[in-house]
Image: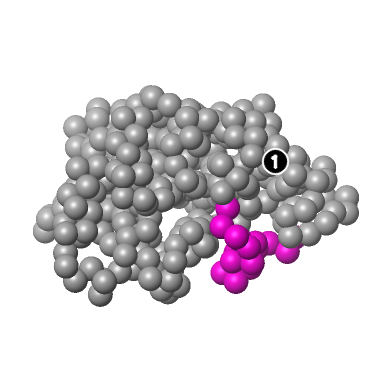
């Protein structure tokens, strides 16, 4: 079987998460988020976020989290502003727009949104005399880290939040890979800081050691009215909610969530060094996603030995490819990649 760097969710769960699932498996519990492990996980997440009043909901996956939060926080006539490369705009099959909320796009700067672009767009929008006939922006959506592995600084998020407050917009942060952003050497804040600089965010479990599940956090106890009903309506509610609760209870015990992320990044830096040593160009990324510029011939040769994602064409002869690490990436995987690179 080929060694895979295709994604950070192509393995099962971290052994400690599985152990907690096994240890609690024969115990009975309530359903729909009212089980004891979900309650325990909520307490641990509130402590980590330093938000004792936070509303926390466990949803089945990232697309459901994005679509449900956006639909729940917006009025029927409102849309959400995101960059062109945003997950909700490119890789979620129109899930947000299916609920009636237009995704309004801005230019992407290595995956990031610019506060200056945001304010310029909003200024022009509010100066338009026909805005009564247009979709009203109600939210700004950013990912941390971004789709391209870049990391917002505290100042960049503060600037975006400032524009949101000026124009009465909510700020929602997609944290499908949140752990990898927080563990990045470029990150200059922690989870508690992030929680105080947005209106909602989620902690991704699926990509950071869990079998499935995301923890949606409304840090100020500001969940939309009847949010549980909205979750149910979107098909994002686990009847056997303990599946998510047990996993997040494990992930937020003894800092496992960040330990998983740090390991993946350590492995990603080894991947990065291998390509650098082979004089193969890379895009900037300090997270577990590494984007490599391969010639099409190199790509085809490497695919004979290693699984990875072909991201997008660069030109007629070159392709941008993505290599991703996770809790499950080992030194043996790195050695396999090194051996494969020697065949190019």
Residue positioned 27% across, 53% down in the render: 83
Q: How is the image coloured?
A: one colour
Span of residues in magenta: 223-240
Q: Is residue 237 left or right of residue 315?
A: right
Residue 102 x, y percent position in the rendering: 34, 68
The image quarter containing residue 116 is: top left
Looking at the image, the residue that sits furthest to the left is 316
Residue beneath label 1, please? 41
Residue positioned 19% across, 37% down in the render: 281
Q: Is residue 230 magenta?
A: yes
Q: Is residue 173 left or right of residue 116?
A: right
Q: Is residue 301 magenta?
A: no
Looking at the image, the residue that sits furthest to the front is 129
Residue positioned 31% across, 65% down in the render: 136
Is 119 situated above or below 136?
above
Tell me the chief SS of the magenta region.
loop
Residue 160 visible? yes
Could you classify mark 1 by the number of other residues whose Cα lies within 10 Å: few (under 14), some (14-19), or many (20 or more)? Answer: many
Q: Is residue 207 left or right of residue 98?
A: right
Is 169 situated above or below 70?
above
Residue 249 x, y percent position in the rendering: 70, 40
Report helix, strand or loop for mark 1: helix
The image quarter containing residue 269 is: top left
Tally of numbered tags: 1
Residue positioned 23% across, 54% down in the render: 122
Q: Nearer the viewer, residue 4 or 105?
A: 105
Residue 325 x, y percent position in the rendering: 45, 40
Q: Nearer the viewer, residue 96 or 317?
A: 96
Residue 143 x, y percent position in the rendering: 38, 46
Looking at the image, the residue that sits furthest to the right is 27
Residue 235 visible? no
Q: Nearer the viewer, residue 61 or 4?
A: 61
């Amino acid at each position: 079987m080929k060694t895979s760097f295709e994604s950070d969710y192509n393995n099962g769960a971290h052994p400690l998460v599985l152990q907690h699932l096994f240890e609690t498996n024969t115990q009975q519990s309530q359903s729909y988020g009212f089980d004891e492990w979900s309650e325990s996980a909520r307490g641990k997440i509130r402590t980590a976020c330093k938000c004792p009043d936070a509303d926390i909901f466990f949803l089945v996956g990232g697309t459901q989290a994005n679509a449900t939060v956006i639909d729940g926080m917006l009025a029927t006539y409102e849309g959400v502003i995101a960059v062109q490369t945003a997950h909700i705009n490119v890789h979620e099959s129109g899930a947000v727009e299916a609920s009636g909320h237009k995704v309004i796009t801005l230019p992407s700067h290595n995956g990031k949104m610019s506060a200056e672009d945001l304010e310029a767009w909003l200024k022009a929008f509010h100066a338009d005399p026909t805005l009564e006939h247009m979709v009203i922006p109600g939210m700004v959506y950013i990912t941390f880290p971004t789709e391209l592995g870049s990391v917002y600084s505290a100042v960049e998020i503060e600037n975006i939040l400032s524009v949101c407050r000026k124009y009465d917009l909510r700020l929602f942060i997609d944290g499908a890979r949140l752990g990898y952003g927080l563990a990045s050497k470029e990150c200059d804040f922690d989870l508690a800081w992030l929680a105080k600089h947005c209106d909602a965010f989620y902690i991704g479990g699926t990509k950071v050691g869990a079998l499935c599940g995301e923890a949606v956090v409304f840090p100020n106890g500001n969940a939309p009215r009847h949010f549980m009903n909205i979750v149910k309506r979107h098909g994002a509610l686990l009847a056997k909610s303990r599946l998510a609760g047990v996993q997040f209870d494990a992930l937020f015990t003894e800092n496992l969530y960040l330990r998983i992320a740090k390991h993946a990044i350590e492995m990603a830096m080894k991947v990065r060094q291998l390509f650098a040593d082979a004089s193969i160009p890379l895009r900037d990324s300090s997270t577990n996603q590494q984007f490599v510029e391969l010639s099409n011939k190199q790509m085809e040769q490497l695919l004979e030995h290693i699984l990875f994602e072909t991201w997008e064409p660069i030109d007629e002869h070159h392709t941008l490819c993505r290599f991703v690490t996770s809790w499950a990436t080992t030194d043996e995987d790195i050695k396999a990649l090194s051996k494969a690179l020697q065949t190019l």
